[in-house]
Image (cartoon, grey):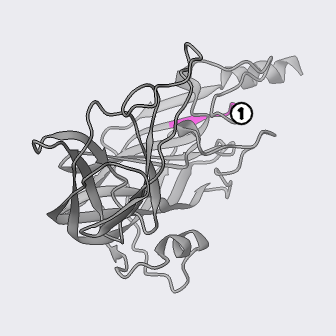
Amino acid sequence: MVARLMKLMCKVTLLTVLPGLLFTTANLKAQGRKTEKEATWYDGLTNRPTEVQPQKLQLLSLQVSRLPRDTFGNAKSPVNRFSLSSFLAASGTGVYGTFTLNDPGTLLYENEPSLLVKFTDNRGTDLTRNPGEEKINDFFEANKPLVVRLSGKDPRATFIVRGYSAPARGAESINATAHLFFLSMKEVKSASARIPAFQADQQHQIGPVSFTVMKPINKQLVRTGRTVNESFGRGKREWVFTIKPRLKPLKNIELLNAEGEVIKTINGPYFHGASFQYFLEPLKEKPTMIRVNWFEKWKLLRVPLKIDTPLGI
């Protein structure tokens, strides 16, 4: 038993960096039946996804660990269950890489409809299964099966495909299939409306956005325990906006003072098919005008991704 445990601890993790290794793209056809996740997200949308193949896909890093992880994504010691240092946090199998999208619009990755369809080794091991007893909570960054990042106007995207299990002993390769979704937006338009008084229960329609200013919330000051002052913009008083973007990607909402100066910018969410709430923190002065900036033209991009690479171990 002791020898077996020592063998397991010696093979805790392996990190291999392969800067020049390319992996292939999938030639996935449009499926006649959407997954339940995709169908829910598409509900009510008029623009159907356009399939776009990723370009210059490159695998940069591969990490394999046989350590179990806890619900927060931390690796645990097989001896006394303490959490190990952060460089072992992504236990299981993780692939890091980049690709580019040749699209002239402003790109935004859509996490909700994106889906990791399959992640296995060549012996059929399902790497998305958790070998431990704890339930995996993918709310935490270290547990998300798909992580995609975009940087400004750079069309290159970085990604992580993550599984919770290590490949089976004797496995020689791993493969993954994922559907990634992006929003491509262009042609910014603006509309403004003057508000005589920034008060609760006001309703406004500005461009494609309709919203209601809800009743302000008065909270206790956390440090002192005293209640807040009732005047506008002091203490922890907040205003709640209920915003309906009406299926136009929202760039931002700007609150302006009487001189036309921006005193608050509300960024995002860029795109949403239903209403959402935004909690506006206290302001130094009252806004007298609201300006909405949105993208008039947009399309959904569906990017099929396929990884098929040797383990090298």
Residue tagged 1: 68
Q: Quadrant of residue 109?
A: bottom left
- 217 over 55 or under it: above or below: above
* Amino acid type, callout 1: Pro
Q: Is residue 63 visible?
A: yes
116 to the left or right of 5: left
| Whole-percent x, y for residue 130 in the image | 72, 45
**168, 246: nearer the viewer:** 246
30 to the left or right of 143: left
Residue placed at 82% from the left, 24% from the top?
4
Q: What residue range appears in magenta?
A: 63-69
| Whole-percent x, y for residue 262 in the image | 17, 41
Residue placed at 55% from the left, 72% from the top?
40
| Whole-percent x, y for residue 294 in the image | 23, 62
Q: Specify the quadrant that holds the C terminus.
A: top right
State the SS at label 1. Answer: loop
- 208 over 144 or under it: above or below: below
Residue placed at 37% from the left, 38% from the top?
18
| Whole-percent x, y for residue 3 in the image | 83, 19
